Image (cartoon, rainbow, N blue to C red):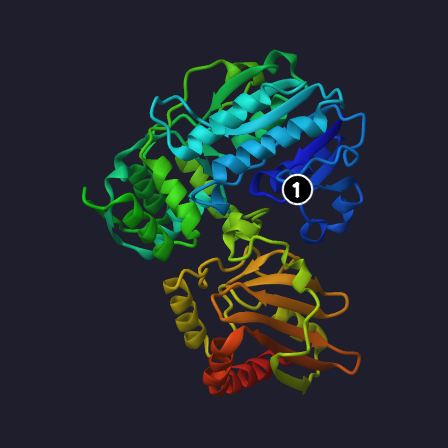
Amino acid sequence: MKILLTGTNGYIGMRLLPLLINSGHEVICCVRNSNRFSINQEMLEKVSIVEIDFLKTPDLKLLPKGIDAAYYLIHSMSSSTDDFDKKEALAATNFNTYVQNLQIKQVIYLSGIVNQNNLSKHLRSRKNVEQILYQGNYNLTVLRSGIIVGSGSSSFEIIRDLCEKLPIMITPKWVNTPTQPIAIRDVLKFMTGVLDNINCYNKSWDIAGPDVLTYKKMLQLYSKVRGLNLFIITIPIMTPRLSSYWLYFVTSTSYKLALNLVDSMSTPIIAKDNNLQTILNISPSSYIKAVELALIKIEQNQVVSSWKDSMISGRFKQNIQKHITVPKRGCFSDCKKIKINNPEETLNKIWTIGGETGWYYGNWLWKIRGYFDKLVGGVGLRRGRTHINELSSGDSLDFWRVLVADKKNRRLLLFAEMRIPGEAWLEFEIDKTNTLHQTATFRPKGIWGRLYWYILTPFHYFIFRGMVQKIAI
């Protein structure tokens, strides 16, 4: 089959793509920016790529004809707290316009469980998108999912952060809300199982695991699997906004995502009984099994995708690839270079920088900088990195974003997503003479930007000098 995969760069899309390819399907990957489509060369040769922003006026010439089915995986919840529902409605409407004359047989939409009368804004938006898609010129299959548990999913990473960092928690009352989580591998089984299945046309199904648990119980069971001691004290006075700040400062989530998640966490998310499991012969895993599988993937460094690598996890929502050319005029820079004896080992050290490895020199200073960044609404250091020794364009790396990760030409270029009065780049490059060049570039905005650089210059001198010496081998 010829399949259109929207939201390919997202958490679900990156996991669904190899399954579709391995099943022999011809996949058209729909992305906003092909420069940050990070898949390996072998997989890249097997797909077609189309750049489309569904929030812009449709250009009907972009999509090819002959598409048999499409996956609709577009959402905007993490990009805004005010108008994400309008953006999601617009994207769905524009999607219908794009495909109205393509004679697509089936569209599969991954939504959320919406069985309550009083829904959160997030779930109301998902339900509204479903209604818009039902107006399209195709057969729609809607899979309404419970909270997804898997390595790299936003929900699981929040649970992991809380349990690993806080042995004693003072929690808001929404931790007693019941929910029905589902393992990521089961979500993918359902998504591939309904493909080209006429019994699933023009129907909406709830998909969830077998366990109905409160968020408190989910935290407790995670701690049990990890062998951690956990004490939870629930208080009724913590408002949604305070709860959002609590998640934002303790976990790696962004504030906008935290606010929207807290809004949804007061709504019970329980699946209705249906026979989709019987139709597809799927027996979903328990919550404990889902946690165990996620932890195995993390320990084996086999995390396929993470919500943190999405652009919505950072400060900049526009195409930051425009920053790929480092400016020279009107900038301050700190340039260090050093001769190296083992370029391969040095390159490996560069490719493992950040995250659990740290920054090789003055890590406590980096942590303090990350803490202050978090205080002023920045991303801080808590995103870490998805892979221990792999980097691709578009990946998040602590409070940086990877612009160029060219191991063949021995160059890594990072762009700062921290809160600063200007723009900053950090570049590592090994030239043909086996000299390591480490260059920090800062383009200030106004007088505050210049003061910022002058104040930090003494710290930069020691940090950057120590870092290049530690990296060089």
Amino acid marked by disc 1: Asp
Quadrant in which the N terminus is drawn: top right
Please tell me how many numbered marks the rendered image carries. 1
Q: Position of residue 452 (x, y in %)?
A: 47, 79
Q: Which residue is mark 1?
A: 53
Q: Residue at x 62, y 62 (%)?
A: 402
Residue located 66% across and 57% down the image:
392
In the rendered image, is residue 345 in sight? Answer: no
Q: Nearer the viewer, residue 271 or 347?
A: 271
The residue that appears at 75% across and 22% down in the rendered structure is: 101
Q: Nearer the viewer, residue 50 or 58?
A: 58
Task: Name the spot of residue 223 as percent of width and height, x first.
Answer: 33, 46
Q: Is residue 245 above or below residue 344?
A: above
Circle 1 residues within 10 Å: few <14, some 14–19, many ≥20: some
Query: In screen coordinates, is 351 left or right of 169?
Result: right
- Secondary element at image label 1: loop
In this orientation, does residue 40 appear? yes
Residue 395 x, y percent position in the rendering: 60, 56
Q: Using residue 149 as the reference point, say whether residue 250 is left or right of it.
A: left
* Residue drawn at (46%, 60%) of the image: 379
